[in-house]
Image (cartoon, rainbow, N blue to C red):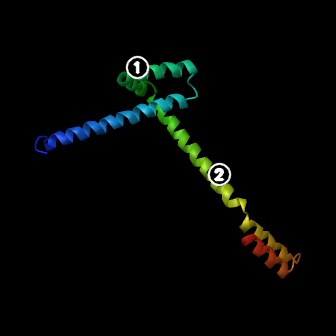
Amino acid sequence: MDDYPLLNIFWTMLYLFLWIMWFFLLFKIITDIFRDHSLGGWGKAGWLIFVLLLPFLGVFIYLIARGRSMGERDLKQVQENEAAFREYVQKTAGSGGSADELHKLSALKDKGDITQAEFDRAKAKLLA
């Protein structure tokens, strides 16, 4: 440990952290290139080649040229995911229809269309 001072450990960790951040940014941009529906095939190929052959310059130019639309696509994707999740939860929670069915059964019993015994059997069947 004496031959590798504490400050060198700090710099090594910092470089490692920046290197990992760089790869996250690179993969985020490559993902955005393929996710963009407004960009044609040749445009996607051109950006991808530019980002892969000249990574630092390509990434910085991509962020300057398309950074705003990249954020808008991220926001749109998050909103679509939330809407799909809400729809799934509503569909799943409402698919059993236990509350609605119990309410209908109660209304039928109150009107006299079914007896208390029939109501109890249907209720037990719904809650089982």
Distance CA(mark 2)–CA(mark 1): 43 Å
One can see residue 65 in this view: yes
Report x, y in % for residue 100: 75, 66
- Residue drawn at 47 percent across, 29 percent down: 30
Q: Amino acid at mark 2?
A: Glu
Q: Quadrant of the C terminus?
A: bottom right
One can see residue 69 in this view: no
Name of the residue lying farthest toward the left: 2
Q: Which residue is mark 2?
A: 87
Q: What is the secondary structure assignment of the residue under circle 1?
A: helix
Name of the residue lying farthest toward the right: 113
Q: Amino acid at mark 1?
A: Leu
Report x, y in % for residue 89: 63, 56
**Which-is-in-front pick, marks 2 and 1?**
1
> Which dot marks residue 53?
1
Whether residue 94 is situated above or below residue 112 in the rendered picture? above
Q: In which image quadrant can residue 109 be found?
A: bottom right
Label 2 neighbour load within 10 Å: few <14, some 14-19, many 20+: few
Report x, y in % for residue 58: 40, 22
